[in-house]
Structures are given as structure tokens and as C-alpha cells.
């Protein structure tokens, strides 16, 4: 199957278009959580609580998301969850109109839960193609993140000052409309039916399903998200409040980081298909290590910019390779259970990293953030080296 045939794959096209529309809630959460929180919060300590609530919502829903889709199918699970997110966005608009901080925080929790379901898009994409095309399909889907990262802020700005509506209430109405369109697009997704062999297969106990390659895939995802969240969340605090860089320069670093997270998807899928998941994972770990080294070397704008760009590239390589490895190594009849374990592990650790980053950088400084990230990279590198020696020969991963 060529890249052109991937573009003609109905499920991939549906998932790509739906994610462009539905994932616009993510930049809206980042942009408006603090701004609206500052206006509605009962005290300064609660300003970032809505954003934290969205992160917790993602972690809480990560386990049931896969299991619900196993029960009701991808189409119903994904479409229903995105529609739920649209209702949560309307709740946020209502909360602003009522001046209710706790309702606003609850709406962010709901949108965070929806994001947990949308993160399952990548597995749906992998299941819609042949094994040798999984990495390219996942990589192609991730390019939608660039679209949503541009469309989301545009909708937020357009709806910020609508006549007759409180500030930013219209922004969430616009996001709700986009998410509703995304839910409707997902109705065109075709569930992948199990064969009679799959239906009659007896799923092994979970402890027997957690093979060394599965462990590496889960650990790779945990490292990708926790290191990225730990450093990215701490960066605005350190750059603007700690070092004194301007808000414009701080924003440029974060924007460059987000672009670096998604732009490598143009090539990362092809890299996995050609060189294998383990080698691409090694590249990602190397980028993480260099990023940490650059961050430790100085606190100039150039140091922050380069460190965060490398951080984004590392996240992309690790995310694509780890997801591909999990999809390739999961038995078809057990894939939802393994995906549930993966999502809970990955986004549970990401939540801890994101919530703890502000406290660590405030109490111990920027250097401590980097030293805290380093052991996660080293542990994954050691497991990768061990498996490369003892398991690579028997791996079913493409290219190994």
C-alpha cells in the first residue's frame, strides 16, 4: 500500500478530518483555561485549576475509553465521546455567562475526558491498514494536530468578543460547533470486524500478555509524555517569571515546540517502516538526551528554543514508534485490554508530571526539572538496549 492509497483509505480520511475539527478543544483549553480561570477563580491559587482538571479528566477516562470501544465499537465510542466534548464546551460557555468557576472547571474535566477518547484515534488508524503501513497511518493522522493547533486559536479569537456574549463565551460555542461537526464526520467510520478465528480465540491472562516488547512500548509512551509534559509545563514559568524573557519570546518557544511535535510526522512514519521501531525509538531517546543537555547548558532564549524544539522532535519519534510497536505486538483479540493498560500508564504518569512541574521548578529550579527527566530517559534506553540484544531477532516489528 503506497502513501497515495493511504489517502484513499476511508477510515483514515474520516479520522483525519474528524481530528482536525475535534482536537481544536486542546489549544482552547491551554489558551483559555488560565485567562478565564483568573477572572472566575475564588483566589490566585485556583487560577490553573481548570487546566489541571482537564489533565485529570484525560487520565481518568484513559482506561475506560478503550474498554467502552471494545464493547460498543470504535464508531459509537469515538463519535459519542466527541459529542460529549461538544456539550462540555457549551457547559464552559454557560459557566462563563453565569460566572461559575466550579462549573467551568467541571466542563474542562469533561473536555479532558473527550481527549482521552480522541487519543484512541491512532489505534483506530493502525487497525484500518495492513501491518506494514501502521507507522505511516499513525504518522499521517498526527499531522492533523498542526491543523487543529492553527484552527483552534483562530476560533478562540473570533469568538472572544461576540456581541451580546460575555468575553470568551463565544469561543467555546465555536469550539462546540467544530466538535459537533467532528462527531458527525466520525459516523462515516467503518468498524473493523473480527474474523471467526479472532472471535473464537481465548484471550490470555493480562500478565501473560505483557511481553517484553509490550513493556517497551508502554514504557516508551510513558517516557515520551511524562518528559515532554514535565519540561514543557515548566518552561513558561521559568522563561517568563524566573529568567525574565518577554512573553512574546516565551510564546515563540512554545509555538516552535508544538510545531516540532507534529511536523516530523511527515517523515517519522516512513522512518519506522524503513529502519524499525527500535532504531527510531533510539533516535527519540537521543533527542531527549540532547534536549536535556542544551537546557542544562544555559538559560538564554536560544537555549530554551533549541531545547524545546528537540523535545518536540523526541516526543514525535517516541510516540510514533511506541504506538506502532504496541499495535504490532498486541494480539487482535486482546488489543483493547492492552490499549487500556497503555493509556492508563501513559496518561497517569503524564498527569503527575504536568501537575508536579510547576511545584518542582518553583521550589528547586529549572536544573532540577532536567535532572528529574533524565532517569526516565535512561531507564527506557536500558530496556531498549536489553531488548535489542535478546529480543530483536524474534520481534515481529517491521524492519527488525
Image: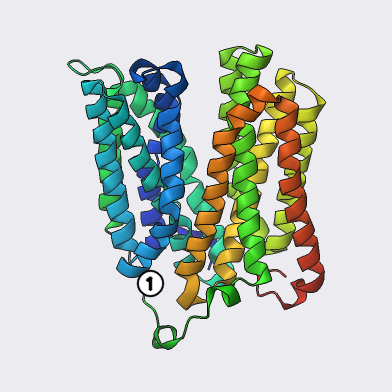
**Label 1 element class:** loop
In the rendered image, the quadrant that contains the C terminus is bottom right
Residue 150 image offset from top left, x and y in percent? 44, 32
Q: Is residue 303 above or below residue 351?
A: above
Q: Is residue 46 above or below residue 192?
A: above
Residue in view at x 48 percent, y 70 percent: 335
Q: Residues within 10 Å of mark 1 (few under 14, many from 20)?
A: few
Please identify the quarter of the rendering in which residue 158 is found: top left
Residue 116 image offset from top left, x and y in percent? 42, 50
Say which of 64 and 162 sits in front.
Answer: 64
**How many numbered tags mark residues here?**
1
Q: Is residue 8 above or below residue 112?
A: below
Q: Is residue 186 visible?
A: yes
Residue in view at x 35 percent, y 49 percent: 18
Residue in view at x 71 percent, y 29 percent: 306
Q: How is the image coloured?
A: rainbow
Q: Is residue 216 left or right of residue 343?
A: right
Say which of 61 and 143 sits in front.
Answer: 61
Residue 214 image offset from top left, x and y in percent? 62, 67
Q: Is residue 103 left or right of residue 352?
A: left
Say which of 305 and 185 sits in front.
Answer: 305
Q: Which residue is mark 1?
A: 192
Please identify the quarter of the rendering in which residue 161 is found: top left
Q: Is residue 269 visible?
A: no
Residue in view at x 82 percent, y 69 percent: 389
Amino acid at each position: 500500500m503506497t502513501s497515495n492509497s493511504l489517502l484513499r483509505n476511508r477510515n483514515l480520511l474520516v479520522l483525519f478530518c474528524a481530528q482536525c475539527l475535534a482536537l481544536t478543544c486542546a489549544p482552547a483549553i491551554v489558551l483559555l483555561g488560565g485567562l478565564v480561570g483568573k477572572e472566575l477563580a475564588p483566589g490566585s491559587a485556583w487560577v490553573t485549576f481548570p487546566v489541571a482538571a482537564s489533565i485529570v479528566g484525560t487520565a481518568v477516562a484513559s482506561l475506560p475509553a478503550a474498554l467502552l470501544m471494545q464493547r460498543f465499537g470504535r464508531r459509537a465510542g469515538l463519535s459519542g465521546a466527541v459529542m460529549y466534548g461538544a456539550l462540555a464546551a457549551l457547559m464552559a460557555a454557560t459557566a462563563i455567562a453565569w460566572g461559575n468557576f466550579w462549573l467551568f472547571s467541571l466542563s474542562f474535566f469533561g473536555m479532558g475526558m473527550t481527549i482521552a477518547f480522541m487519543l484512541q484515534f491512532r489505534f483506530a488508524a493502525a487497525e484500518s491498514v495492513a501491518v506494514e503501513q501502521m507507522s505511516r497511518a499513525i504518522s499521517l493522522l498526527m499531522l492533523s494536530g498542526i491543523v487543529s493547533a492553527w484552527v483552534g486559536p483562530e476560533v478562540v479569537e473570533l469568538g472572544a468578543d461576540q456581541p451580546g456574549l460575555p468575553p470568551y463565551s463565544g469561543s467555546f460555542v465555536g469550539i462546540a460547533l467544530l466538535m459537533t461537526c467532528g462527531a458527525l464526520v466520525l459516523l462515516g467510520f467503518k468498524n473493523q470486524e473480527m474474523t471467526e478465528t479472532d472471535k473464537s480465540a481465548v484471550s490470555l491472562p493480562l500478565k501473560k500478555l505483557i511481553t517484553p516488547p509490550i513493556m517497551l512500548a508502554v514504557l516508551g509512551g510513558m517516557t515520551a509524555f511524562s518528559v515532554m509534559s514535565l519540561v514543557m509545563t515548566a518552561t513558561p514559568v521559568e522563561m517568563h517569571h524566573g529568567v525574565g524573557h518577554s512573553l512574546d519570546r516565551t510564546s515563540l518557544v512554545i509555538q516552535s515546540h508544538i510545531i516540532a511535535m507534529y511536523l516530523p510526522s511527515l517523515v517519522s512514519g516512513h522512518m519506522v517502516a524503513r529502519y524499525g521501531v527500535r532504531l527510531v525509538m533510539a533516535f527519540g531517546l537521543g533527542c531527549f538526551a540532547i534536549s536535556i543537555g542544551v537546557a542544562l547548558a544555559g538559560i538564554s532564549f536560544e537555549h530554551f528554543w533549541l531545547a524545546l524544539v528537540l523535545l518536540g522532535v523526541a516526543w514525535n519519534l517516541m510516540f510514533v514508534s511506541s504506538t506502532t510497536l504496541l499495535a504490532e505486538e498486541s494480539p487482535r483479540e486482546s488489543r483493547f485490554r492492552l490499549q487500556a493498560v497503555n493509556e492508563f500508564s501513559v496518561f497517569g504518569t503524564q498527569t503527575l508530571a504536568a501537575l508536579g512541574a510547576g511545584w518542582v521548578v518553583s521550589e528547586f529550579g529549572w536544573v532540577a526539572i532536567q535532572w528529574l527527566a533524565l532517569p526516565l530517559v535512561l531507564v527506557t534506553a536500558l530496556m531498549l538496549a536489553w531488548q535489542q540484544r535478546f529480543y530483536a531477532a524474534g520481534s515481529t516489528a517491521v524492519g527488525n
